[in-house]
Image: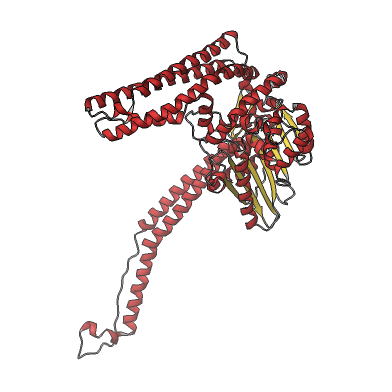
Amino acid sequence: MGSNTVEIINTDIVRARIAELEYGGGGTLITEEDIRRILIEETGIEPPQNIKVYHSKDYKKQYLDGEFDSGFDGTIIHFYDAEKGINQAYTITRGSEHNEKDLKDNAPLDWIYNALGIYTGETTNQYRHASLFNKIVTSEIKSKTSVELKNIGIGHSLGGNLIQMLHLLNSNLFDNVYAINDAPPSAYQLAKLDRDFYYELANFFEFNRRDFKQIYTIPPKDLKAFAESYYKEQGKNIHHLTNEEDMLFAASELRGFLDLGSRTMLDSNPDFESIRERIANLSDEDLYEMQKFLVKYAPAYKAGGYDGLIKAMTGIDLVLLQDLKSEWEGFSITDNPVDTLDSAWETMKKFDEMAVSLRDFIEQLPVLAENIPVILSIFTDLTSEEISVIEGELAGMESDVIEIRSMITDLMSMSTMEDLLTLNPFTFFENIKDIKEQFEAIDSKINGLMDRFDKIFAAIDRAKLDFGAAVEGHSLQQVSNALAKKGRRYEGGNLILYKTGADGKKIEVNLSSSVRIYQRGMDSYEAREESLKRYQAAYDAVFLDDFETRKRHLLSQIQDMETNPRAFRSVFNLEDSEISSIQVHEHIPPLPPAFADRMEEAVHHFQYQFDKGRRLVTSIKTSIEKMFNEEKDIAAIFELR
């Protein structure tokens, strides 16, 4: 792997597998070891020695600069070898998933941004944060290297949209861009971020550029043609890798989405018919209405994330409710009446604000009832019974909200300052108790309202079989398996080898795991052997070497006495006599043989165990090599690091 003209990450399968690492669960970050492993597994060639991985989380303070966290995540992988002329940076962008603070564990934030940020163009903060992260790290890399930097972009899903937007809006930023099952850029999104494009658009279609919403009235086919022509040159180095089953590829039929660059199609599930045709059959009038509906709530999502969106759509402040519940759970009238008064008064003010929002929600319910069937028709096969369930729950929401507003009105009436400031402690305590019980009743009713949402989602879930297959087709693992060589598949980031045995049964081996076991096992025995050598050296120094040192010292003193007897006159207390000679008859017995023999036996025992362990670990390697001898690079995969 030499020369800067050839990309280090140079195949679709390597790009897909490394991009999948970016979406690892549990907050797992891409490591240098991961990069080396995948490159070795797919190429059988030793990667460049100098690999550094930059994570966006380490630069958040710099690129956020006090702003609301958009949920953007990303990684830049840098390969550098000055002697071979290699200096390449791979920017892998990832959109928000579950990174923003919200109260729902499964809030689909990536899809919310797809709808509000891309489809409407109203939310641009993830693009801005991706751009700043890339700029900061690229500048850092350039300051430390002497070879010209080659930049490559990789992205999946919303990350695929972000990497394309970075390329389209920043001339010559990337030499190549690889978008895998990407959310395509939209003309609305580009118009929001690219002033020159927006002005040309306004001039060509003759609308008032001060009113951005007029862009939604442009016939979508005309808008698409104009935008694709405008960005054609800048987009020629964008390369798409797309599953036919991918739901975002299907969604690219929606108004305003662009198709730039080249595209390679995969079919990972021949039995599944794409939902692309369904979307294509939707009328532009319905799509326009849905777009207007989404535009209305984009500012709320931009300002407050998922919680802000829920509050804007329903009038219910989930964060406020959680705070109030926490505050009243530890509530004690007798501990501190003054604090109790403050808590009660603050709660009243907050509920008064919520009552206003709930009134707005009642007005929005008809819009929800009108738009939800349009949206659901894209992805589901709802039965008439399921539609009735949804319509019934939406109607029930209206009555629930009216009742909640009435309960808040009652709460406000029982919590006037005159009632709360009574000098009668029993009346005061009774009033506070009534307020607490009313709050709990309101909270219970709101939980019932949320249950209605859950029932709607459950009905949708039962009918979304095609949608689920489209979501599965969107995954990077599905892409990797569609690209896999014969006898290979991928699961959880691992390479699995498989074949049919002589008995007709399928044999599978997790090669990635086997290599880890082999290398860690060999490393472990090497470390133990080094420890044994150090122990043996220490033993020799303390016993054998020390004995010989003491013996030499003693013999040296004897020789000194025999060659210089007069110097020892005072030792023998002979003041009136002379010492003419001294003869020492020494007998220094050697160390018992057991000292050396036992150590030698111990070393031999442990060395035997180490060699036995190595043979066992090596047998894993040789067995797999024999079983899958058609894999030419398998020996290199085990040995290369």
How far across and how far down the image is residue 206, in percent? Answer: 77, 33
Viewer-side residue, 168 vs 49: 168
Q: Residue at x 34, y 26 (%)?
A: 416
Q: In the rendered image, which quarter is residue 537 located in?
A: bottom left
Viewer-side residue, 486 vs 294: 294
How far across and how far down the image is residue 221, in percent? Answer: 77, 27
**With 456 as the anchor, is 244 left or right in this view?**
right
**With 451 as the anchor, is 10 left or right in this view?**
right
Q: In the rendered image, which quarter is residue 121 located in?
A: top right
Q: Which colour scheme is used?
A: secondary structure
Viewer-side residue, 457 vs 216: 216
Q: Which residue is drawn at 77% across and 32% down?
A: 205
Q: How many marks?
A: 0
Residue at the farthest bottom position: 576
Image height check: is 268 above or below 530? above
Residue at the farthest top position: 385
Can residue 111 be seen here? The reply is: yes
How far across and how far down the image is residue 310, in percent? Answer: 52, 27
**With 17 as the anchor, is 323 left or right in this view?**
left
Q: In the rendered image, which quarter is residue 507 located in?
A: top right
Q: Residue at x 67, y 26 (%)?
A: 246
Can residue 261 be seen here? The reply is: no
Residue at the farthest front position: 418
How far across and how far down the image is residue 335, in percent? Answer: 25, 33
